[in-house]
Amino acid sequence: MTKKTLLHELEKATSWDENADIICARNGINLSSRHGFKQLHKNFATAFSRLDQCWNKYQGTYGSKHVMGGIVTVYGRMATDSILRNQLHKSGFLSKVLIAIQDPITRVQGLQTLHTVTHHGGSEIRDDIALKTTPVLVPVLQESLEDDEAAEYCISILSHTFASVFLKDLEIQVPAETLRQLQVSKVIDLTLDRIQRKGLDLDTSELTHGVSLIAAIPLKDQRSFMKNPKALRLMIACLRSPFLGFRCQGMVALYRLHTVDVVDERRDMSPLVMMKAASGNYPRQIKEALTTYGLERCDINIMMYINSTMHDAILQCSRDGDLAKLGKALAQNIMATEYSIPSGNMYLDRVKPRPPFNDWVDGLPYCAKALRAQNDFDTADIIELKYLIMKRNWDVLDRVGKAAIARNPKIPFFYYAMMMKSDKDMIKWAKKGLQCEQIPPYIRWGLHYYAAWRAMDRAFEGLAEVNMDEPGWEEGVAYLRCAYQDLKAYIDGAPPDSKSMLPALNRFILVRIIMDGPALGTDLKEISDILEKQRGAEELHEFFWGTDPPATQVNRTRKHIMDNLAKSTEEWKVFIERTAIMTPGILGAQDDKQDENNQSLEKALDVMQLDGEHIEHKAYGSYMFSGMNDKKIELYRCTRCHNPSAALRKCSRCGNSRYCDAECQKQDWKNHKKVCKSAEISA
């Protein structure tokens, strides 16, 4: 191959794809079939070396841009295979791509390749690419705000890489130096500028990537996010979109903004609260609310009664030392209220013989043992499970709770205890508990509230990340409906002084905003009854607890939305209108299509109730893309991470599931074992 011959062919080419075809042919690289990709897996080092030599040979010469753009295009084709993409990254191809991006002639080809690499890249690759490419992409984006193709690619790449950097676990902080290198404030400003400039003409892909990019940042960099108030108002404006996915993205971004310096929503019934309750001297509105519900059914009145019965039970035990009798009395209290177990050592010195514990809480296992000696296993398990909840001993609770349910599945407290572990099966235990008969009120409301709490968070996060036609959409919608139903049951039925009433109302307001979207006015008058009830719950909290309503994540999010909804809607009205002109299937169904999904929604909810939180996802299909001469090439996707490759390993038993490597195969075993028992994984 001579310099003249190659350049002569490239000069006659009419497109970058044709350039890439010529370079592949002259370097013995076949990217026209899955077989060709498999051969490239075997001979990657040789192929990459040839491309490297070709690049170096023509760099700085006349016609070098033809070679540079063609080779970068070849890299992009290789990167459609996730395993080859990783090898390209390890081999240092990125430096050449950045050179191409900085040249206006080859810029789009470089950006296109980088987009392909980051689209399915793993977190390590994306993190590295973010640090190395952002200093190049930011000035390119700044000078390309009127260049649709370059700007769209820049925002898409930044969306992919920023998601990797910013959406890690909350405990993992992004170093200040990394934030400086990523020029976060500048990226926010440019992205907002681009969205506003294009208005109704903004491409759908760029629209979704731009929103995702802005929404990822507040989880780890609230300071940069809040420097531009328009970013906050854009996320609030998302709540006015006709599309559910946009509404969820906006809500999740606002959630992320309030992950620091938040207050726990849980409130204990302190002696001060009990003293105010005993006085009966309530403000008029609070007294009316409690009286209308029924004072004898309100939590604080029940607590005062239980305190009296606890005292009597302990006093009786100090006289007769009968721990089984004490256990039965305490079990009745446990079924009546959360605050049912005495702490301290009152009257312990009177018990003869002196029991081997110094606090009545630590006496619960001894009460359970005494009850089992009398074959009263249900009461014993109630006592022991309450003790394990108080001690937060979740491993032992899991074992005791499952054994109790296996022996007697009709006792709702067993499911309540299992739910309190807050693990992946939280909703499953809550739903099964609600199927029991004769559920004590506080347990019923607890099952509803905690199921809604978990379902709401899962719905917002899931629906913000998937399209309507992707696996996970149906699951997210089911969680959303689950949260709505359980929150409504709670706020309609629980006592007004219930400790979770205020957070439940705050959550219900957010769920209604998500579900109803633009059907609600910016003043939210359509849910004025809920807002009034929420204000009443705040007044009740201020009276009994003597403090302002806690600045929880949910409360701060609700307040931010309500304070800025009208202004955000006006400022971003063109953006909201643009989100209404979406390709079907992108980021979710419009409100007028919601009824069409009811059957699948109910089906998904049924599955969730029976089998736990996880709804089995439909399998990802193969990945199709254009190869040489526009020939369609099909690559299978990894069953676990969904990355496409021609060199996936099959499950040795069934041959249906395919994986990138042994690690992906092992991590998918929990799901795959339901349909296949692979000796290789089991070993």
Image: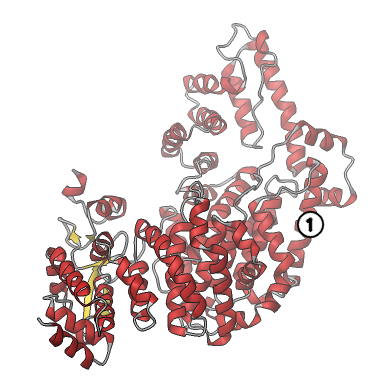
Q: Quadrant of residue 73?
A: bottom left
The quadrant of the picture occupied by the C terminus is top left
Query: Residue 42 at what x, y percent from top left?
Result: 12, 64
Tell which residue pokes out farthest to the front in this image: 61
Q: Quadrant of residue 281?
A: top right
Secondary structure, mark 1, is helix
The quadrant of the picture occupied by the N terminus is bottom left
Q: Amino acid at mark 1?
A: Arg
Q: Is residue 651 left or right of residue 432?
A: left
Q: Is residue 170 left or right of residue 1?
A: right
Query: Residue 554 at what x, y percent from top left?
Result: 65, 55
Return the residue nearer the eye: 377 or 610. 610
Q: Is residue 534 left or right of residue 441?
A: right
How crowded is the residue under tag 1: few (<14 C-alpha within 10 Å), some, or many (20+)?
Answer: few
Query: Residue 391 at what x, y percent from top left?
Result: 54, 30
Return the residue nearer the eye: 535 or 145. 145
Q: Residue at x 54, y 53 (%)?
A: 454
Return the residue nearer the eye: 606 or 210. 210
Q: Is residue 438 above or below residue 324?
A: below
Q: Is residue 620 visible?
A: no
Q: Is residue 98 above or below residue 176?
A: below
